[in-house]
Image (tube, rainbow, N blue to C red):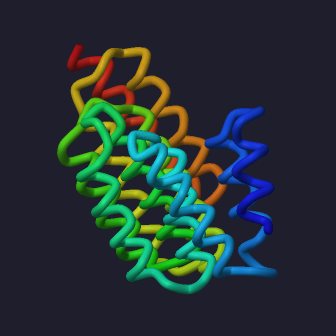
Amino acid sequence: AILEIVRRASEQVNDKQLYLQVSDSLRKTNPEVAETVYQIALRKHKQSKKVWIAGGEAKFLEGDSAGAREVLERAVLSLPRRKHIQTILKFAQMEYRYGSAERGRTGFESLVGNFVKRVDVWNVYIDMEVRKLKSSGESRDLQFLRNLFQRCCSLRLSSKKMKHFFKRYLEFEREFGDEESMEAVKQLARDYVQSQ
């Protein structure tokens, strides 16, 4: 009955959005129907990263990290190449939130290794690591983040982008570091300016 209602409604409105909304809202009450609706959306919209990301997030929320990783593998095979970066980025973020932070890190390392000049990827990576540091408070996370900032500050990007990274690094040290670490960042920035 629900599937028939959804099918008729999809003729009147944006069916991709409808399928995703219905699937999401039925996840807790009726998971079998939700999965069926999601599969219909996937069949009709294989080229949509939103559909693949929604499927991956549903798997993570169910506690099925391995299933979510399979969704990512299938997504990369089905999606056009131009959508791969954003899809992998979203899955890496979901790994941090719901799965294993180490696997999330691996996803980000793969992205920044292949797309070194993508400042947006670096920024999301830093954001996820800062969030992880705030929740765990472990000193090894602090050191990992400092190393990540130093990697960012050693890139060869435009001066505007580099200024952004130095500013973020200094703000980070202001929050988590001390006077000595802040001075080290300032010196790193001065060295960068002199090298230009």
- Name above or below for residue 59 compared with residue 57: below
Image quarter of residue 117: top left
Q: Residue furthest bottom?
A: 63
Q: Residue at x 52, y 50 (%)?
A: 51
Residue 164, x across and y down, in percent: 49, 27
| Image quadrant in which the N terminus is located | bottom right
Question: Left of 50 or right of it: where is 34?
Answer: right
| Image quadrant in which the C terminus is located | top left
- Residue closer to the observer: 127 or 77: 77
Q: Residue at x 32, y 61 (%)?
A: 107
- Name above or below for residue 14 compared with residue 68: above
- Name above or below for residue 53 compared with residue 57: above
- Name above or below for residue 163 compared with residue 135: above
Residue 21, x across and y down, in percent: 74, 54
Question: Left of 145 or right of it: where is 174?
Answer: right
- Residue closer to the observer: 2 or 181: 2
- Residue closer to the observer: 156 or 30: 30
Residue 175 in view: yes
Residue 73, x across and y down, in percent: 28, 63
Residue 2, x across and y down, in percent: 79, 66
Q: Residue at x 36, y 62 (%)?
A: 72
Q: Residue at x 42, y 50 (%)?
A: 89
